[in-house]
Image (cartoon, rainbow, N blue to C red):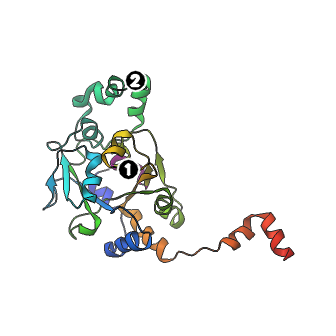
Amino acid sequence: MNLTEWRALTQRPLDRSRLLDILVNKINLKRPPVAVTYCDGAPPAGYEPARVPVCSILYHAEQGRKIYVDAEHHDCLVGQYHLGLLSAEAAGRLICDGEYLTMAQGFFTPEAARRNKQQSHSLPTGTITAIAAAPLADLPADVPLDLLCLITDVQRAMQIAGAASVREGTLPHGELGPSSCSSLFAAPWHTRNTVFALGEGGGRSFNHLASSELFVVLPAHHLPYVIEVFESFWFKPDEMRRLIFPSHAVRASAL
């Protein structure tokens, strides 16, 4: 799949301002939603290069920056590999087999490190030239919104990540273990699905996550569902109990 095919997954127009309003004023996100764009040419105009680990672009975008990471501007070989900006040959066993995990940490076995990398998602080499991030509130109208990335608490993550599941029946994909860059930017591409992830130590630290927070990443074709869910949201807890809890139904009839 190339970038044109990825964007063709989105069949419906998106009201970005309505989406932002729901996220900020209905869901009451505490941290700003971040728009991520895959680039197969030059980065969008007005975005600045950042020599940072790619997973941290979310935190920098939350601070109001429009930034990008590419093969020249970055600060993490693991991120380069999982973005497809560094070939397996160039990455070598240090990255591809996860040797760096055992060289700097005592708890990883070589076999576990190798299997970790085998099971982690990476964009195919050469798919993109850069990845860019900006606050959703400041995303220029002509810049594609490929991924919406959020850092939020478990309750809000459950509601947002589950949007597609209650509209079309697609359960979100969950990750624990891979590098954050793999979970955030490559897993949604390969699964074509919303991803929720705890991240790993580096990704959580670079993005300043509290212990109660996790990542949620929605591909563009799932974003209309967020609007639909929260524009039609209602719930009758007592009726739900009557329908599925026999003891509740008995008590209700006795009354």
Residue under label 1: 209
Residue 236 placed where, x, y %?
Answer: 64, 74
Secondary-structure class at tag 1: loop
* Numbered badge on residue 56: none
Q: Name the residue at the front extreme.
A: 210
The part of the image, by quadrant, that contains residue 248 is bottom right
Instruction: Name the residue rendered at 25%, 59% in the picture.
Output: 63
Residue 186 on the magenta segment: yes
Q: Distance between the residues labelled 2 and 1?
A: 24 Å
Q: Nearer the viewer, residue 136 or 118?
A: 136
Q: Can residue 42 be seen in this view?
A: no
Type of amino acid at the residue the image marks with label 2: Gly
- Main SS of the magenta part reads helix
Q: In this view, does 42 lie to the left or right of 164?
A: left
Instruction: Name the residue rendered at 25%, 63% in the picture.
Output: 144
In the displayed structure, 177 sits above or below 254; it is: above
